[in-house]
Amino acid sequence: MEMRTAFVYIKGRLTRLESVRQGDSASEFFYGSEQMRSQGHEVDLFEVRNDAATGRSERVVDLLFSCGLLPNRTRGAVLMGTKQLLPSLNKYDVVVATSTGIAFSLCIWKALGMLKPDVVAIQCGIFNYRPNWLRRAQMKMLLNNMWSVLFGEGELEEMIRIFGTPRERMKVNYFGVDTGFWCPDSSAMNNGYVLSVGNDFRRDYNLLLRVAAEMPARKFVILTRIKIEAAVPPNVEIRGSSWHKEALTDIQLRDLYRGAACVALPLKESHQPSGQSVALQAMACGKPVIVTRTTGLWHKTLMKDGENVRLVPPGDAEALRTAIDNMFTDRDVAKGLGANGRKLVAAHFTIGHFAAGIAAMCQDALQNPRHRKRRGAN
């Protein structure tokens, strides 16, 4: 079926588009729009701000949000920004919202009769904050009027349990990375450090610092914008990291992956697939990855401990220390994990796989009887 699709991002994304098209940046955080365009779909990209409120309407929305009177992640700049886009978005069949805040904002306008296209929502951080009863009721209503894309099975079960979202309105679409960009380099030198990357507050950096203190002979590099309160051992280097501010280019990050002995991602227990993008990027670069086995681990069957990844229990410093030490003491094991991790990503977790899932969800929305009725009336 012919499909006109609009993708809506948080501001800052489009400045990197040319870099992606030139091969100097990875494409996965455009969430499949480039791949859909290359396959002949009509795709256009839009942005909205997500910073401090600048006008009266935005400040009122932020006040309502702070009082618990609007859905999770619904902020003034995004809500009013999506309103400004409505005349353009109404020309499309489907709108892909690339964050939970954008999705709720669009569906508020849809509930008010101001947005016509169906909304496909890439849900990011929907469980970061436990909603009060009013927020839960609002979110339930809005979720029943969008098509939600989730990154893992754990999120799907929670959506059903907390919001009662119909299963047919949701699809697990495993995140995929740009394996053309994230790839091994046989000439890269292994500099012998343990790398950890990420800004998600579910990262357990305090645990990693405890482990690092017990391994003074090993160097650790942490890339995060999270403020770390714990004492930092002398063998740990902490660098700032932010995708939107681009403190580090993708090429520089790829070089860090390639130069690492291993990538360690200690996580707190969660239903979210935290650490997914970093783990897949590192695996695509052929690096052994150690990650916490949480409830939200994105694929419990394909992620095989000791074969293509090392899985450790949440909060277990000894297990994490042993896994890291093993990457140095048994290089054959480390090399095998890296090679098998690359094969796993190439077979199941590429941005091509993810883009196909987004396109399929958009087609599901178009096949919805309500959409066909509206389309026939236009």
Image: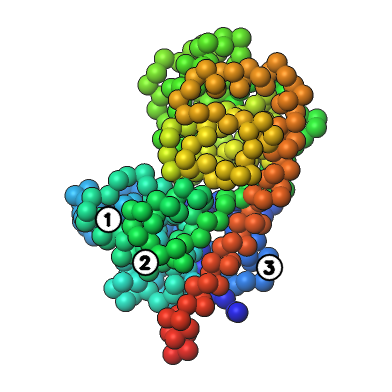
Which image quarter holds the C terminus? bottom left
Separation of marks 2 and 3 at Cα, in angstroms = 30 Å
Q: Position of residue 305 (x, y in %)?
A: 63, 33
For marks 2 and 1, the one nearer the N-term is 1
What is the x, y in percent for residue 43? 57, 69
Quadrant for the N terminus in the image: bottom right
Question: Is 300 in front, or is 288?
Answer: 300
**Relative to residue 61, is residue 281 drawn left or right?**
right
Pointer 2 and pointer 3: residues touching (CB < 8 Å)? no
- Distance in Å between CA atoms under marks 3 and 1: 38 Å
| Numbered circle sitting on residue 271 | none
**Amino acid at dot 2:** Asn
Residue at image position (56%, 63%) is 358
Mark 2 or mark 3, which has the lower sequence index?
3
Q: Which residue is mark 2?
A: 144
- Quarter of the image for residue 128 reads top left
Of labels 3 and 1, earlier in sequence is: 3
Q: Nearer the viewer, residue 19 or 95?
A: 95
Residue on which the image places disc 3? 39
Q: Residue at x 33, y 64 (%)?
A: 142
Query: Which residue in the structure is indicated by mark 1?
Result: 136
Q: Amino acid at mark 1?
A: Arg
Q: Residue at x 58, y 67 (%)?
A: 360
